[in-house]
Image: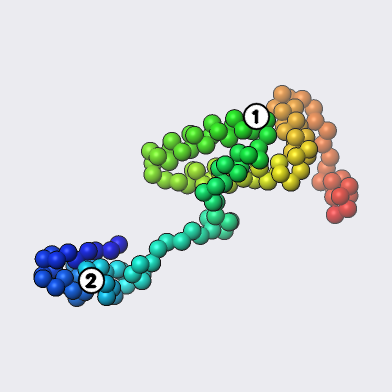
Amino acid sequence: MHVKAATGEFGALGHAAEAEAACGSTTCSTRAGYCAPARYRVGMMPSPSAFDGDQPVSTSTPREIRAALIGEEIAHFDREYRQVMADAAESLDLFGVVSMLKRWQRVAWSTRDDPEAHRHMLACADELNAAGAVATESWEQTKARLSL
């Protein structure tokens, strides 16, 4: 947190020693009237960093994700995006937005990487949700089929 030493607030000079006393910092800026906690350099700005060890979500991601989705996924994405944005506006916490975007980003990657396989997966999920029978195979059969 920066503290501005306005003229008159710390005397006519408003110099660093008086500003330091006001904010309790042991390292103050040479810029007139500003000081910062000892562990930060003055003017240091936070930078985007990985979230939970993953790549950060870019600001263009919602549009890109939506463009990659197919069928009903677009409406589901829109509805959930509006809800998490409204929640974030109330709570002032973007965790839900970032989590939602990461989840939908994986769906978009699945669609982009193999649209037909993604459609097949959606059809199987619909069949399972309708209590239908879907052909399955064991992990051993899958490994053998894929030569793993």
Q: Are marks 2 and 1 in contact (CB under 8 Å)?
A: no
Q: Residues within 10 Å of mark 2 (few under 14, many from 20)?
A: some
> Amino acid type of disc 1?
Glu
> Amino acid type of disc 2?
Ala
Give the quadrant of residue 117.
top right
Q: Secondary structure at mark 2?
A: loop
For the question of whether residue 103 can be seen, the reply is: no
Q: Secondary structure at mark 1?
A: helix
Q: Residue at x 66, y 40 (%)?
A: 68
The dot on residue 92 is none
> Residue 120, how many percent across, how many down?
78, 35
Q: Is residue 58 left or right of residue 20?
A: right
Q: Residue at x 10, y 71 (%)?
A: 12
Mark 2 vs 1, N-terminal side: 2
| Colour mode of the rendering | rainbow
Give the quadrant of residue 26.
bottom left
> Residue 146, how many percent across, how many down?
86, 50
Q: Residue at x 46, y 61 (%)?
A: 47
Q: Residue at x 76, y 32 (%)?
A: 124
Q: CA distance from mark 2 to mark 1?
A: 58 Å
Give the residue number, with chain letter if any, for mark 2.
32
> Residue 74, how many percent across, how many down?
62, 33
> Residue 35, how many percent across, how many down?
26, 69
For the question of whether residue 50 can be seen, the reply is: yes
**Image quadrant where one finds the N terminus:** bottom left
Q: Residues within 10 Å of mark 1 (few under 14, many from 20)?
A: few
Q: Is residue 31 left or right of residue 15?
A: right
The dot on residue 72 is 1
For marks 2 and 1, give the one nearer the viewer. Answer: 2
